[in-house]
Image (cartoon, grey):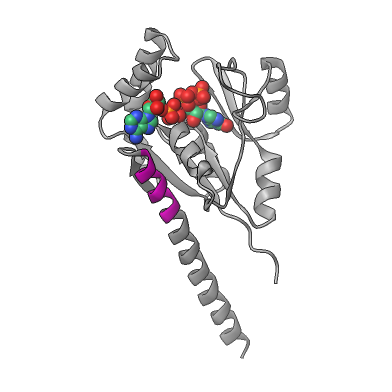
Amino acid sequence: MDTEKGLLIVLSGPSGVGKGTVRKAIFDDPTTDFEYSISMTTRKMRIGETDGVDYFFKSRETFEALIEEDEFIEYAEYVGNYYGTPVQYVRDTMDAGKDVFLEIEVEGAKQVRRKFPEALFIFLAPPTLAHLEERLIGRGTESADVIAYRISEARKEVEMMNLYDYVVVNDEVLEAKRKIQTIVEAEHLKRERIEARFRKMLLEAKK
Ligand SMILES: Nc1nc2c(ncn2[C@@H]2O[C@H](COP(=O)(O)OP(=O)(O)O)[C@@H](O)[C@H]2O)c(=O)[nH]1
Ligand SMILES: Nc1ncnc2c1ncn2[C@@H]1O[C@H](COP(=O)(O)OP(=O)(O)O)[C@@H](O)[C@H]1O
């Protein structure tokens, strides 16, 4: 039998909702058996970040050349910087039968939806918009202007949540992590059942 393709899991949601935090909790958990696709970006490296671990940090020229060469599954310009998912790693990993996890903003998630409609889309939502503002201010990495902009974007983004397969409210980080792991497990079981039913029907059709 051919190796089954891995699942593409997309975690998205407004900036500051906790996507990075929840993603870290997922990958800090040794029971997690999906692979994280490291994004490429043109934004400046923050203190504590490492090139090739948090992102692949590139110049605008390099990023734009890679866009021309069709090297991204999706990319978006967000608050003046490019962010994108390199295609090669995702394809190779899925072809090897492993699940790939993307943590991206909502415009990119829309593009993935067009290219990979069979992917699993999970929206991370804040308990309230007030929580979102608090978290962005609390993180202390952006100026007041950027925070105000991100909040106004977040209002629009929250309205997109009905386009997703699941909405997970990020109240407690470990609880959100557990819910996402459970959703992925359930999705595998569902797809295995559909696959088994399909094979049974094929066998019956051959009789
Ligand atoms: N479309 C897209 N968005 C990404 C990608 N990687 C990260 N992002 C998103 O870009 C936004 C800004 O990321 P970043 O500058 O690290 O800020 P932070 O997530 O708010 O800490 C976040 O919403 C990320 O989830 C990617 O490859 N593609
Ligand atoms: N469940 C949570 N409860 C309280 N604070 C949180 C929670 N999840 C994340 N945060 C905090 O909110 C801020 C934004 O989180 P971050 O992961 O950077 O968001 P995103 O990647 O979506 O932009 C950080 O300071 C983080 O520590």
For this rendering, which residue is in front, 9 or 135? Answer: 135
Q: How many marks?
A: 0
Q: Residue at x 66, y 24 (%)?
A: 51
Magenta segment includes 180: yes
Q: Residue at x 54, y 75 (%)?
A: 196
Magenta segment includes 137: no
With 64 as the anchor, is 183 left or right in this view? left
Is residue 17 visible to the viewer in this orientation of the structure? no
Residue 50 higher or lower than 20, as above or below: above
For this rendering, which residue is in front, 76 or 125? Answer: 125
Q: Quadrant of the N terminus?
A: bottom right
Q: Residue at x 54, y 80 (%)?
A: 201
Image x and y of residue 160, in percent: 36, 36
- Magenta span main SS: helix
Image x and y of residue 99, in percent: 58, 52
For residue 170, what is the image quadrant?
A: top left
For this rendering, which residue is in front, 77 or 179? Answer: 179
Q: Residue at x 55, y 16 (%)?
A: 47
For residue 145, what is the image quadrant?
A: top left
Residue 166 higher or lower than 189, as above or below: above
Residue 202 higher or lower than 178, as above or below: below
Tell which quarter ligand 2 is in.
Answer: top left
Q: Quadrant of the C terminus?
A: bottom right
With 133 as the anchor, is 79 left or right in this view? right
Is residue 98 visible to the viewer in this orientation of the structure? yes
Give, as a single range, the part of the protein colored magenta. Answer: 173-182
Image x and y of residue 158, in percent: 33, 33
